[in-house]
């Protein structure tokens, strides 16, 4: 019976629509200004996953188990990631709510009441006067939106696209957190390396001071040499104390990134990663890898969602047809369950049609808003792609520049170390003044410090390049297909 009702409702709907369609509000002249997205767009292509680089757990390339554990710990305890995950769940729930409107809606109702009938002029004399009866009913109500114009389908797809967008944004937040942990950890390693240099410098300065005192005691030195040897020691101690402070501050930063108390960060040991370690890159970096960047993927889902929004707005111009039915029992009188008798069965079924005729321009405004929103999403996507291309190019240039700087810094350290040794030997033989030794030591410390900073910057650049490429190639990455990026 229900099948015959649906067929009859559809036939009646088509007849009514053919009569009323001429009265629909026009959507003429309202459309997105962006006609299409280029099908050869680099970010639309799938990433070349067979290259195997970078890995999803890209930070493992640094070879430091403590770093690996801290990145995992940050992923579990970060409040920002918890908030991003909650936004994803919220969007998924909203998508489920919208999708439910496409399904058959069935509601059950029932009522059981004992009624006392009065004896007055309104009810009049009769069988019910001054009597008590049961006034009961029970039934089912069914409704189904036929969705002839795809409004509910498009709304459901739009909600799912927004949920996908939230998931991509969660991945972006996760990637940003991983990058921040790696950068802070590299800075922690750098401060330890700089501390090693200063402690070595302090040891050399102390040895030279002792040598100056022995020379003075032997009568071949002067008090001025001793004073000059003592002069740099307080400053070296100050710089060492400042580096201890910097190390603790970076430990606190790493604790905050993991959602922990500052004191827990102080438990971090000295990083095992070596600043001088080589980190290889593939021979080629296809631009298609940009399609894996979470911000690019999120922008594409936003475009797809806005395209579905246009379809929802367009469907609003056409008649809406619902199929409704109810079936139930009702009776006044008899015993408690007497209303369930077959002769007390009642039902009704039929279509319900609504058509917008005059709305003061509301539907046209909604379509115009949806079209403008689509243009805005496309423009944002294209700007995201341009920024991504620039980001990758900048990171590659920085990496190449730092490779050159690394070689030059090593040469400078070797030359400064040789110069320092020559100055020290010449001073011991009385050939030069002690100021020459101090200058050579200062230059050596500066060059060693520069070298460590360049080495750390190389590791930072590797992280920056991986992040610029999306933080790792993921098999089956969720990205909207090309046809969904335009209104149907």
Image: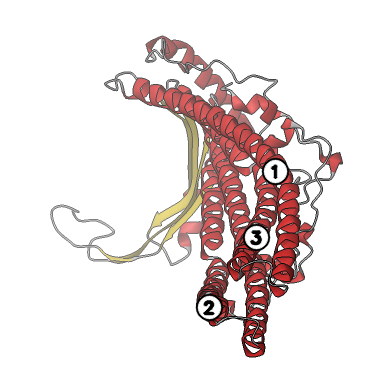
Which residue, given by chain and number where applicable, does mark 3 sit on? 182
Residue closer to the observer: 117 or 238 = 238
Q: Which residue extends farthest left?
A: 121
Nearer the viewer's eye, disc 2 or disc 1? Answer: 2
Q: Residue at x 61, y 46 (%)?
A: 168
Q: Residue at x 50, y 58 (%)?
A: 340
Q: Which residue extends farthest front?
A: 219
N-terminal label among 2 and 3: 3
Which residue, given by chain and number where applicable, does mark 2 sit on? 224
- Residue 49 at x, y = what percent? 82, 40
Position above or below: 140 against 209 = above
Q: Which residue extends farthest bottom?
A: 217
- Residue 444 at x, y = what percent? 66, 62
How many C-alpha atoms fall within 10 Å of the one at disc 2: few (<14), some, or many (≥20)? few
Q: Is residue 238 left or right of residue 217?
A: left
Q: Residue at x 76, y 48 (%)?
A: 407
Residue closer to the observer: 110 or 142 = 142
Q: Is residue 316 left or right of residue 231?
A: left
- Residue 267 at x, y = what percent? 62, 81
Colour pattern: secondary structure
N-terminal label among 2 and 1: 2
Q: What is the CA distance from the residue labelled 2 to the residue labelled 3?
A: 48 Å
Displayed quadrant of residue 82:
bottom right
How many C-alpha atoms fall within 10 Å of the one at disc 1: few (<14), some, or many (≥20)? many
Which residue, given by chain and number where applicable, does mark 1 sit on? 399
């Amino acid at each position: 019976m229900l099948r015959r009702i649906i067929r009859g409702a559809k036939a009646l709907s088509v007849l009514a629509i053919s009569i009323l369609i001429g009265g629909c509000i026009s959507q003429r002249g309202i459309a997105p200004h962006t006609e299409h997205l280029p099908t050869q767009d680099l970010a639309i292509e799938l990433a070349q996953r067979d290259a195997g680089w970078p890995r999803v757990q890209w930070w493992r390339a640094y070879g430091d188990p403590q770093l690996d554990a801290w990145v995992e710990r940050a992923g579990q305890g970060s409040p920002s990631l918890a908030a991003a995950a909650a936004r994803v769940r919220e969007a998924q729930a909203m998508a489920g709510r919208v999708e439910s409107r496409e399904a058959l809606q069935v509601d059950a109702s029932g009522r059981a009441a004992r009624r006392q009938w009065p004896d007055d002029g309104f009810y009049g004399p009769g069988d019910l006067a001054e009597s008590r009866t049961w006034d009961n009913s029970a039934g089912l109500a069914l409704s189904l939106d036929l969705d002839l114009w795809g409004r509910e389908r498009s709304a459901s797809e739009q909600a799912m696209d927004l949920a996908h967008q939230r998931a991509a944004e969660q991945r972006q937040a996760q990637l940003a957190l991983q990058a921040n942990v790696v950068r802070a950890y590299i800075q922690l390693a750098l401060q330890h390396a700089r501390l090693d240099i200063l402690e070595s410098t302090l040891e050399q300065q102390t040895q030279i001071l002792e040598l100056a005192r022995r020379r003075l005691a032997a009568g071949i030195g002067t008090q001025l040499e001793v004073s000059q040897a003592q002069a740099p020691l307080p400053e070296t101690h100050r710089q060492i104390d400042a580096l201890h402070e910097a190390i603790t501050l970076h430990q606190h930063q790493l604790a905050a990134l993991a959602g922990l108390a500052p004191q827990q960060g102080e438990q971090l040991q000295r990083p095992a990663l070596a600043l001088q370690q080589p980190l290889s890159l593939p021979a080629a970096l296809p631009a298609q890898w940009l399609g894996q960047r979470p911000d690019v993927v999120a922008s594409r889902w936003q475009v797809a969602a806005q395209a579905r929004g246009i379809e929802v707005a367009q469907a609003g111009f056409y008649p809406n047809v619902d199929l409704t039915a109810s079936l139930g029992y009702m009776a006044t009188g008899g015993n408690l369950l007497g209303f369930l008798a077959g002769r007390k069965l009642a039902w009704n079924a039929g279509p319900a049609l609504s058509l917008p005729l005059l709305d003061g321009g509301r539907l046209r405004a909604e379509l115009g808003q949806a079209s403008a929103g689509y243009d805005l999403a496309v423009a944002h996507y294209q700007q995201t792609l341009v920024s991504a291309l620039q980001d990758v190019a900048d990171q590659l240039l920085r990496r190449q520049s730092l490779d050159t700087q690394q070689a030059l810094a090593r040469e400078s350290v070797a030359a400064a170390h040789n110069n320092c040794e020559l100055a020290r030997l010449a001073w011991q033989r009385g050939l030069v003044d002690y100021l020459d030794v101090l200058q050579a030591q200062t230059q050596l410390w500066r060059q060693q410090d520069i070298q460590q900073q360049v080495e750390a910057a190389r590791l930072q650049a590797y992280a920056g390049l991986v992040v610029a490429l999306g933080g790792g190639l993921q098999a089956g990455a969720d990205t909207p297909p090309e046809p969904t990026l335009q209104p149907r």
